Amino acid sequence: MMNRVTQKTLLSFCSILLLCSASLHADQKQSREESELNTSDLSYTVYINSNKRIKCLYGYAADKTGDHETAIRIFEDCINRWNDVYSMLWLAQIYESGVSVTKDLQKSTALMKRGALSQDEAGYSSLARYHYGIALFTGTGTSQDKKKGTEFLIKAAREGIQEACDFLTAEGVNCADKKPE
């Protein structure tokens, strides 16, 4: 027969085991639910390895929520698969600011140049021409070439990027009278 102290100790021990077991079960359930959330169609993480082009837009969501590594993976894949200019611009911005990667102005400018030399239906190439034009004009991440920078900026302005004309006007260049060479 057990004495009262041993019985109380055993009951306390069993109670603690039951509480720990319930807590572990709750943690496992929450972990499974979180895992299911992260792989739902509404989560950007489900698009990391997707072959659907919409994934490129989810790179933005990943970047804005602070998951820069995922954003970079998505953007790089979109660039490799589809030469996606939207992804080039966002990845260029990440390298320019040095968020979650070593700041690399040359890499940033190279991505903007690639986008500027592309033509997409959505108009992101025009925006890339604007940014690449400024990089050339100011010598950011590339050798300074104001003439070539002006050409890209004028083209971007003609494609509807008002900021390109505003930049040139601030630099004393009348973009309305200029024609790309």
Image: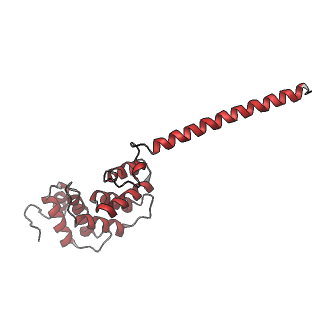
Name the residue at 44% across, 62% down: 101
Name the residue at 89% across, 25% down: 4
Q: Which image quadrant is residue 3 in?
A: top right
Which is more toward the observer, 119 or 4?
Answer: 4
Which residue is most to the front? Answer: 1
Colour mode of the rendering: secondary structure
Task: Give coordinates of residue 63: x percent, y percent.
Answer: 39, 52
Q: Quick check: 163 above or below 65?
A: below
Name the residue at 18% across, 56% down: 161
Task: Give coordinates of residue 133: x percent, y percent.
Answer: 22, 65
**Quadrant showing the C terminus:** bottom left
**Quadrant showing the N terminus:** top right
Position of residue 94 in the picture relative to residue 23 (left or right):
left
Task: Give coordinates of residue 125: x percent, y percent.
Answer: 22, 60
Which residue is most to the top? Answer: 4
Q: Which image quadrant is residue 10 in?
A: top right
Q: Quick check: 8 above or below 54?
A: above
Position of residue 173 in the picture relative to residue 17 (left or right):
left
Q: Which image quadrant is residue 39 in?
A: top left
Which is more toward the observer, 48 or 91?
Answer: 48
Name the residue at 60% across, 35% down: 26
Task: Give coordinates of residue 36: x percent, y percent.
Answer: 48, 42
Which is more toward the observer, 72 or 92?
Answer: 72
Number of marks:
0
